[in-house]
Amino acid sequence: MRGVMALLVGLFLSLPAAAQGPGCGAPEEWLAAPPLRATATGISTGRLSILAVGSASVTGAGTSSPAAGWPARFEALLRERRPDLQLRFVVRGARGSTAADQWRLIEQAMREGPLDLVIWQAGMTEALRGLPMDDMAATIAHGLERLHARGIDAVVMGIQFSRFLRANVDVDPYRDALRVLAAAGDAGFFSRYDIMRAWADAGTVDVERAPAARRTAEVDRLNDCLARALAAFIRDGVEAARR
């Protein structure tokens, strides 16, 4: 058992360098996850299938290349730590996609092959456009229920932090709704907003205050840190499932 735990921990360890601890120094309170049993089982059998779905951020918007987006960085971390793992990593989404659009992509991915974990980056389009929360909530609640019934782990990734966004959009109702939906749907909630705000406050990563010449590099760093924080979050869920 001790050897198994060492492998599980090793899988999701962040890389060294200036990461300031697991998840680029993200507060531990935001890296605590519920048990992710299907993910733990997939790792123990040597085969893991993950779907990352969402809006613009899953495509690497604003980065130097798609390879610098958080899904690509997260996949790279997994492959680097466990090259022996048979990993299937699928990314679906587009700028402006809603929860309904994303759920259709999830359904399509489930038809194409088995999944152990779905990372659902949700709510950003609805918040930006001021779309009805009831429609978003109904779609996500239905989707999480279906995933849970099929034994697929789900992690809901929340809205990103931005001073400009907060000043111009009432994001709090959407943030709160996503948190409640995740809890009700037996899913993990990765609070991207709170983690990014903590980094900005600490000066770890702050895209909005970066000089224009360094803006793309800072977006790349943000996505890398998000991938590392997500890895720490999922590692916690895997360990919780094994305890």
Image (cartoon, grey):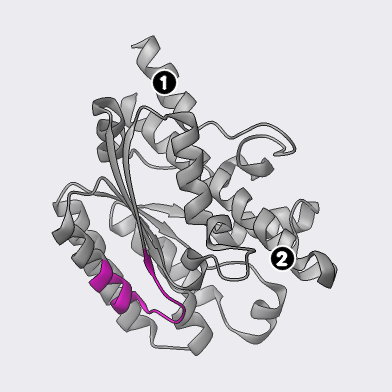
Q: Residue at x 49, y 47 (%)?
A: 74
Report the disc number at residue 7. Answer: 1
Disc 2 on helix, strand or loop? helix
In the shown orientation, is residue 14 left or right of residue 18? left
In the shown orientation, is residue 104 left or right of residue 182? left
Q: Residue at x 41, y 21 (%)?
A: 7
> Where, quadrant-wise, is the N terminus in this rendering?
top left
Write the start and end of the magenta stretch as one range: 92-105
Q: Residue at x 65, y 86 (%)?
A: 168
Closer to the eye: label 2 or 1? 2
Instruction: Tell me: residue 152, above or below residue 122.
Output: above
Calculate the distance from the C-alpha at mark 2 to the C-alpha at mark 1.
35 Å
Crowding around mark 2 (Cα neighbors within 10 Å: few <14, some 14 to 19, many 20+) is some
Residue 53 lies in quadrant: bottom left
Magenta run includes residue 196: no
Q: Which residue is mark 2?
A: 216
